Image: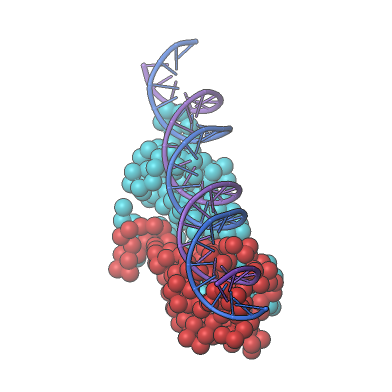
Chain colours: A cyan, B red, C purple, D blue
Amino acid sequence: MLSNSSKYAIKAVLFLALNSSEKNKVMAKDISQPINVPQAYIAKLLQELVKEKIVSSVRGAKGGFYLDDKNLNHSIMSIVNVIDGEKRLNSCMMSLKKCNEEKPCPLHSILSTSRSQILNSLKSKTIKDLVEEVELGNAFLPL
Amino acid sequence: MLSNSSKYAIKAVLFLALNSSEKNKVMAKDISQPINVPQAYIAKLLQELVKEKIVSSVRGAKGGFYLDDKNLNHSIMSIVNVIDGEKRLNSCMMSLKKCNEEKPCPLHSILSTSRSQILNSLKSKTIKDLVEEVELGNAFLPL
DNA sequence: TCCTAAATATGATTTTTATCATATTATATT
DNA sequence: AATATAATATGATAAAAATCATATTTAGGA
């Protein structure tokens, strides 16, 4: 469903949402350890997100990554789309080219409602929403 | 979510369910074309399913693959488990080792109900069930 | 029994994904 | 200005998934 890279990216963004601000930037190496992803790897992923304005950064001394208010309002889906591309989540579960709502494949027909629910959640939930879940104690970020 | 291999395997099994019987076996090369998967590839996948008794086969002249009544009652999940292993579908969506119902990660907390619905469907629906969907005209197998 | 047809076992190759390394560019501090 | 620090660009390597190829075994028919 989600690639490793996407999962890492989401973890990193959530970490930034909880631990950074424009005045308190975080370096790649200081994200790497708490989220348990190699630093060169997470740096690369964050760069892709910066390019698409989902994460903010400044380079040089005192630089680092952070999220501003605008960044916080991006959907989880937007992260996945940057890292995995649009196709991944929207392709037929049986890889049939001609599968659609009118002529659904058997898996489609069985799974489509729960599948749409997942896609809708990913589209509608923002980074900020997930942060709130954590702050409310409804969700956790162990390691 | 599902690997390419699993999707191919499901397609092949469904094709067999609709087009084979003990008296009417189908060779790998005759499955390959209609489901649009290379023959050496689908042969390999079917062999793994035969080993786990989800598909039946006999080799030699007049041999081929087929499904008997017992085979038809296997769940879709069982196919996926053979091809992708048990982990794939059951791992946390953020790859957190310590994610569980009591301490769910943010994605878990957002997606868990629809996710469980999908897993339950895959577990409860049998090959026969999907075939019925097709026979009733609720689902289609184009290409 | 011999030949042919098919699955099976095994492993090689290719492609994709994940991971690592390094040189370059930009920023702040001195 | 010079230096140190950090992201960025680029590309190399490693691992996994997907794909292809071939020799072996088994069954049926002549």
Nearest the camera: A132 or A97? A97
Taking the spot 37% from the left edge, 61% from the top edge, the residue there is B105
Q: In which quarter of the image is residue A48?
A: top right
Taking the spot 40% from the left edge, 37% from the top edge, the residue there is A27
- x then y, percent, for residue B62: 61, 78
Left or right, residue B38 beside residue A54: right
Left or right, residue A11 beside residue A137: right
Taking the spot 62% from the left edge, 73% from the top edge, the residue there is B27
Residue B38's place in the image compared with B20, above or below, is above
Residue D7's place in the image compared with A112, above or below, is above
Nearest the camera: B52 or A128? B52
Residue A122 in view of the camera: no
Residue B58 in view of the camera: yes
- x then y, percent, for residue D29: 64, 80
- x then y, percent, for residue A7: 45, 54
Residue A19's place in the image compared with A132, above or below, is above
Left or right, residue B105 beside residue B76: left
Residue B99's place in the image compared with A15, above or below, is below
